[in-house]
Image (cartoon, grey):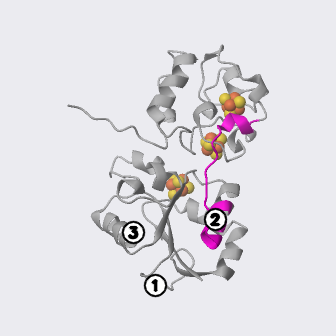
Amino acid sequence: MKKIGFFQLNSCSGCMFAVLSSTIFLDLLKSADIRLFRLISDVQTEDQFDVVFIEGGVTRNEEAALLRRLWTEGAKIITLGSCAVLGGIMSHSPNMHIDPVNKFVDPYATLPGCPPPQQLLGNLLMSAIDGIEFKLPEKNVCSECPFAQDQTYDVEITSLNALHPPKSCFLSEGILCLGPITRAGCGARCIKGATPCDGCLGALDRNLPSALANLFSVLKVSDSIREYAAIAFRYQKPELKFK
Ligand code: SF4
Ligand code: SF4
Ligand code: SF4
């Protein structure tokens, strides 16, 4: 039986609740030795893990040291959610500096999303049970969107929010949607819920600034939208380096 731990760093517990609500979690309970999951159990064994799932980003030296210890002891580290993978929405806190987990250790597998989509999460949990390699989709959100055939970049983007469910692609209605540069896997759940994609699954080519630069080079974005950078970098703050 694989020895598994679920660790929470600086996070909102949303990813762990997504794990708990996954139908695959029941299989995991039967077929794995879950040694640590503070959200649901006081039973804690702090050592000897084969696989650990990490939710949340890193702020303290002790958290970085914990990750390094788990890694050097041979645990496969799986980062769960946009905070652990990208820094996430938590990294915008004015009171603390948050780094993604991969700044300290080399994850065996990663699953972004805020929270991660259930289908991919189920595949990831299965991979922890069976040792099957987990792979993220190599398509964008538009590939799963019912409005993909209406997509056009010719309309001026004048809004960041949808006031009503879309009748066609958000971009063709003048509303910013990051579906073209965002990794698929959620089934375009926000668009189906009448909200444009703000990129929680991360950039498909893993380089968000260059993906955004390419997208914004073909979009006509109105000067009236001043806060679009806050949407574009919601889950992954750009690293600014000044000389
Ligand atoms: S990725 Fe989203 S759901 Fe998961 S811990 Fe961070 S804020 Fe919460
Ligand atoms: S840009 Fe947004 S609304 Fe348009 S096809 Fe892509 S995901 Fe769908
Ligand atoms: S549509 Fe975009 S923001 Fe919404 S879940 Fe999918 S990737 Fe995340």
Residue, far front: 132
> Residue beneath label 1, please?
45
User: Which quarter of the rendered picture does the N terminus lie within?
Assistant: bottom right
The image position of residue 122, as x and y in percent, is: 68, 62
Boundaries of the magenta span: 123-145
> Residue beneath label 3, please?
71
Find the distance from the CA under tag 2 to the CA under tag 3.
20 Å
Q: Residue drawn at (73%, 39%), measured in percent from left and top?
A: 144
Asked whether residue 80 is in view, the answer is: no
Residue 83 lies left or right of residue 2; in this view the side is left
Eye-nearest disc, 1 or 2: 2
The image position of residue 218, as x and y in percent, is: 57, 17
Contact (Cβ within 8 Å) of mark 1 with mark 3: no
Question: Above or below — where is 170 with respect to 59?
Answer: above
Question: Above or below — where is 203 with respect to 229?
Answer: below
Q: Which amino acid does label 3 sit on?
A: Trp
The image position of residue 61, as x and y in percent, is: 28, 63
> Residue beneath label 2, please?
132
Q: Which amino acid does label 2 sit on?
A: Ile
Earlier residue among tags 1 and 3: 1
Residue 117 lies left or right of residue 7; in this view the side is right
Examine the structure image and report whether residue 140 is included in the region drawn in magenta.
yes
Q: Residue drawn at (36%, 53%), measured in percent from left and top?
A: 103
Residue 122 lies left or right of residue 87; in this view the side is right
Element under disc 3: helix
Question: Above or below — where is 32 with respect to 210?
Answer: below
Find the distance from the CA under tag 1 to the CA under tag 2.
25 Å
Asked whether residue 32 is in view, the answer is: yes
- Nearer the observer, 134 or 34: 134
Q: Residue drawn at (32%, 35%), measured in percent from left and top?
A: 240
Earlier residue among tags 2 and 3: 3
